[in-house]
Image (cartoon, rainbow, N blue to C red):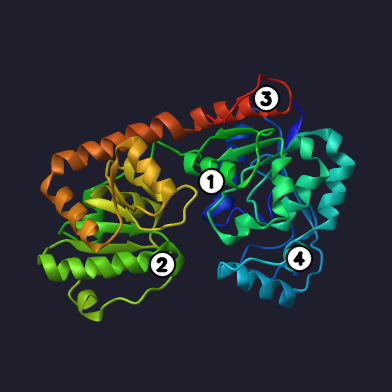
Amino acid sequence: MKKIGFVIPWYSEKIPGGAEMELRGLTTHLHASGVEVEILTTCVREFSSDWNENYYPEGEDVVHGFKIRRFKVRKRDTRAFDAVNLKLMNNQALSDEEEKVFTEQMINSDALYSYMREHSGEYSLFVFIPYMFGTTYYGMQVCPEKSVIIPCFHDEAYLYIKRFKPVFENAAGIVYNARPEYELANRVFDLSRTKQIVMGIGMDTDLSCDPQAFRKKYGIDSPFILYAGRKDMGKNVHTLVKYYSEYIKRQKSELKLVLIGGGEIELLEELVREKKIIDLGFVDISDKYNAAAAAELLCQPSKNESFSLVIMESWLCGRPVLVHNDCAVTRNFVCEANGGLYFSDYFEFEGCLNYIGAHRDIADEMGQNGRNYVHANFSWDVIIKKYLHFFDEVSGNGKENSAG
């Protein structure tokens, strides 16, 4: 197999979470297994930066022993893009002309696309992540027969952009992070000619945790629920805070809510003052794992996930999880693993907490079920073996495959 080029709008070792973290882990482990990989990206710093600004110098860099090629971005009409993007953020459909504005005025690099055309013979495959950016939309059209996408699809307005349909339907391969994502994609697109696989994200499964070290360091002796992640509306953490606040009033419980991660959210001052809700902000990764091991459970209330690293980390630390029923991906993980519970409204939330509190042995069993599930499906040796097999099939070196 020739080298594989991974295409992403921006890339840095310092960008936390999301597609960047997924790609970083995948390319590093593929390289370690002997695959020649490269990252093809723009000179933009990160998602929240000005997409007109070339922060990094154009050219080649080497990280973890493989190349990163950076290309300058095309100048864009930010105002025009923001106007149509606002409609999408409000779940409004776009006209054909507005869709054209969206794809043409978001992040793009003509230099990147030219490089791919001129050097396509050097690569077995180009792998694109995630789905909604110009580098994916236009990049996949350069060599559709060599294009694999790791889309990270959500059921959102962006998914239904009509311009995306012929591009994704002509992909050589699609890799999904979870089965509900595969099911969603096949409802929206005709992928009968595309090789597909449900893969998931690789995990370092040998992490260590010390629940007592967390309790001692932060002075938390009472049982607690843990939330780990960004504190914003998109993660639905406000619902968790609201439901927990109601739970404390109704149940007179000693159960606390511990929040870790960046962002801000409005909290009831009384509960903060009484140390019922404890917001620790950013913590070291070791503290994060120790907190997961010390918690009664981890609550992941987001309704919009294509995977969830914090759920897998909680299971690796031996604790069950509580997720929102409206997130097909996280609910599916909980059901497949038998590693937790899910809720739709406050009273189901209350019932789940009471059940876990009254059945510690079953909670421990759920945590162990989850741990076994992660090891069987998402350890790096399992994931890399699946990727190598799939890449062989898509590039013509293996047998045909349907979603696994």
Q: Relative to the observer, which residue lies in front, 180 or 226?
A: 180
Residue visible at 87% across and 50% down in the picture: 114
Residue visible at 59% across and 28% down in the picture: 402
Residue density around tag 1, few if under 14, some if 14–19, many if 20 or more, within 10 Å = some
Residue 179 placed where, x, y %? 48, 39
Residue 392 placed where, x, y %? 68, 25
Q: Which image quadrant for residue 366?
A: top left
Q: Which mark is residue 184?
A: 1
**Mark 4 or 2 closer to N-term?**
4
Q: Which mark is residue 54?
A: 4
Residue visible at 45% across and 38% down in the picture: 204
Q: Secondary structure at mark 1?
A: helix
Residue visible at 28% across and 70% down in the picture: 242
- State the CA–CA distance, disc 2 to disc 1: 27 Å
- Which amino acid does the dot numbered 2 rest on? Lys
- State the CA–CA distance, disc 1 to disc 4: 35 Å
**Mark 4 or 3 closer to N-term?**
4
Q: Nearer the viewer, mark 3 or mark 2?
A: 3
Q: Are marks 4 and 2 in contact (CB under 8 Å)?
A: no
- State the CA–CA distance, disc 3 to disc 2: 41 Å
Q: Secondary structure at mark 4?
A: loop
Eyeballing the image, is 389 above or below 226? above
Q: Nearer the viewer, mark 4 or mark 3?
A: 3
Q: Are marks 1 and 4 in contact (CB under 8 Å)?
A: no
Mark 2 lies on residue: 231
Q: Are marks 4 and 3 in contact (CB under 8 Å)?
A: no
- Which amino acid does the dot numbered 4 rest on? Asn
